[in-house]
Image (cartoon, helix red, strand yellow):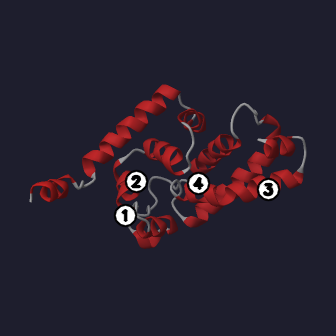
Amino acid sequence: MQLAAAAKAGSDAAFAELVERYQERLLRFLLTRCASHADAEDALQDTFINAYRYLHSFDPRWRFSTWIYRIGIRNAMRQKPPESAAQVDPIDASADPLNDCIVASEHENLWLAAKRVLTEDAYTALWLRYVEDLSIRDVAVALDRSVSWTKVTLLRARRKLADVLPTNRSAEKGARYG
């Protein structure tokens, strides 16, 4: 909060520190929203340019992360290819560095399934809540939605994922009774 206030007051060093702190996390997030790594990098650059340009409008009542993610979401939407353009299959792990990370992680099935079955807003809400660890209120602000919408969307997204993800319940039953 102090860095954001210092940057708002005109400290370039404070803004540079904010960029350093958020660029990797924000790029990882933008990779889930953009068609390619290059588009995500463009959106990242545009996000920090816009943040610097509009730093005077930052409201210190909100976390800086909420504000920067909201700008990032808007910039990612501008990077979307036209509907007629060929799109990268989100299941093709070799086509996207984010998917490479997901495949290598223990949460592979969760995030690949989420990308496949959820709406973009629901996926983004889940990502911001559970990967970026934003509060429900901050997720709502970042997505420009109400807290109620965010809670319902998160609940429905978790339920939908629970329906499509394999569980170990049958293995647990076998272990208890076998």
Q: Earlier in the sequence, mark 4 or mark 2?
A: 4
Give, as a three-letter code, the residue at label 3. Answer: Glu
Image quarter of residue 153:
top left
Crowding around mark 3 (Cα neighbors within 10 Å: few <14, some 14 to 19, many 20+) is few
Marks 4/1: CA distance? Answer: 20 Å
Q: Secondary structure at mark 2?
A: helix
Report the front residue among 168 and 84.
168
The residue positioned 53% from the left and 46% from the top of the image is: 128
Across and down, in percent, residue 68 comes to 68, 45
Q: Earlier in the sequence, mark 2 or mark 3?
A: 3
Q: Nearer the viewer, mark 4 or mark 1?
A: 1
- Contact? badges 2 and 1 (CB < 8 Å): yes
According to the picture, the residue beneath numbered tag 4 turns out to be 79
Question: To which residue does mark 2 refer?
Answer: 115
Q: Nearer the viewer, mark 4 or mark 2?
A: 2
Q: How far is the residue under mark 4 from the one under mark 2?
A: 18 Å
Q: Amino acid at mark 4?
A: Gln
User: Tag 1 or tag 3, which sits nearer the N-term?
Assistant: 3
The picture places residue 146, in percent across and down from the top left corner, at 53, 27
